[in-house]
Image (cartoon, rainbow, N blue to C red):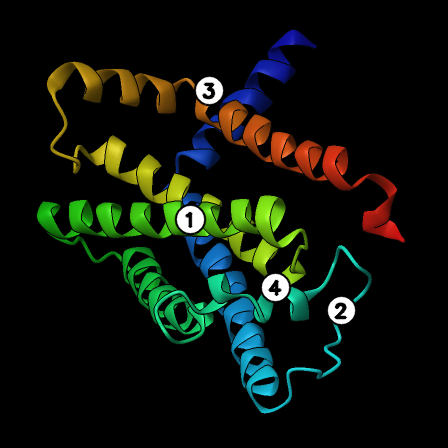
């Protein structure tokens, strides 16, 4: 029984570190984010035409795309943030498809992609914090983007650590590689996402489902 369990564990370990899994996760997550960005872009146009428009994701006082979409945070740069998602996720999808097809980008390119996407992740979590602490409403599509951005970031980081693309100091690179090889990064991501769900439930409780 132990041997069978160990064999299954080894297969799962090999699968998770395979390029098909890494780039497939990146591609799927980016596609989810692109769809969410498209829906939010359409909603932003509807709200620009009619601020009182009834959006399908205006479910209750907590789950409300309209309330979030009308906030200044939703158009931080003078246009809907979702437009940035349409651009960024299209690029990520292109990179993921190319990597799945066997293309190998230069080290500087992948390091640059890591930096740019890290900024995107920070922006996504800033928007999440604004929704939680300032706007006091949550947008389901924004939550999809937060989740998918997290998964794309970790998939990209996984690959770049494995390939040594990040130009990190030797000690830091070694620790990062050990974290990925031991699969401990999976537990970190799972714990982080669980924490986000817990924070939402602790703040809003049953109002989320009202």
Nearest to N terminus: mark 3 or mark 1: 1
Disc 4: which residue: 68
Picture coordinates of residue 78, whole percent (x, y): 37, 74
Q: Residue at the top extreme? A: 2
* Residue drawn where x is 15% and y is 54% of the image: 105
Tag in front: 2 or 4: 4
Question: Relative to 124, is 39 on the left or the right?
Answer: right
Report, in whole angstroms, how far the alpha carbon at label 1 lies from the one at label 4: 24 Å
Nearest to N terminus: mark 1 or mark 2: 2
Picture coordinates of residue 203, whole percent (x, y): 73, 37
Disc 3: which residue: 184
Whether label 1 touches label 4, CB < 8 Å: no
* Kind of element beneath mark 4: helix
Disc 1: which residue: 152
Disc 2: which residue: 58
The answer to whether residue 128 is above or below residue 181 is: below
Picture coordinates of residue 56, whole percent (x, y): 75, 75
* Residue drawn where x is 41% and y is 74% of the image: 83
Nearest to N terminus: mark 3 or mark 2: 2
Whether label 3 touches label 2, CB < 8 Å: no
Question: Relative to 104, is 178 on the left or the right?
Answer: right
Nearest to N terminus: mark 1 or mark 4: 4
Residue 194 in view here = yes
Question: Relative to 53, is 81 on the left or the right?
Answer: left
């Amino acid at each position: 029984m132990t041997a069978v369990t160990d064999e299954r564990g080894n297969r799962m370990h090999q699968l998770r570190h395979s390029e098909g899994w890494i780039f497939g996760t990146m591609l799927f997550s980016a596609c989810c984010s692109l769809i969410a960005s498209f829906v939010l872009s359409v909603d932003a146009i509807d709200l620009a035409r009619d601020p009182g428009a009834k959006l399908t994701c205006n479910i209750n006082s907590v789950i409300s795309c309209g309330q979030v979409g009308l906030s200044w945070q939703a158009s931080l740069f003078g246009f809907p943030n979702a437009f940035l998602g349409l651009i960024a996720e299209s690029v990520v999808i292109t990179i993921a498809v190319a990597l799945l097809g066997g293309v190998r980008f230069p080290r500087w390119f992948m390091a640059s992609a890591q930096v740019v996407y890290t900024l995107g992740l920070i922006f996504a979590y800033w928007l999440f914090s604004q929704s939680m602490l300032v706007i006091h409403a949550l947008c389901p599509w924004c939550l999809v983007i937060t989740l998918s951005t997290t998964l794309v970031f970790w998939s990209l980081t996984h690959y770049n650590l494995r390939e040594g693309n990040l130009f990190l100091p030797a000690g830091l690179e070694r620790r990062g590689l050990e974290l990925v090889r031991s699969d401990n990064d999976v537990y970190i991501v799972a714990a982080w996402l669980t924490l986000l769900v817990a924070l939402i439930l602790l703040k809003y409780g049953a109002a989320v489902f009202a």
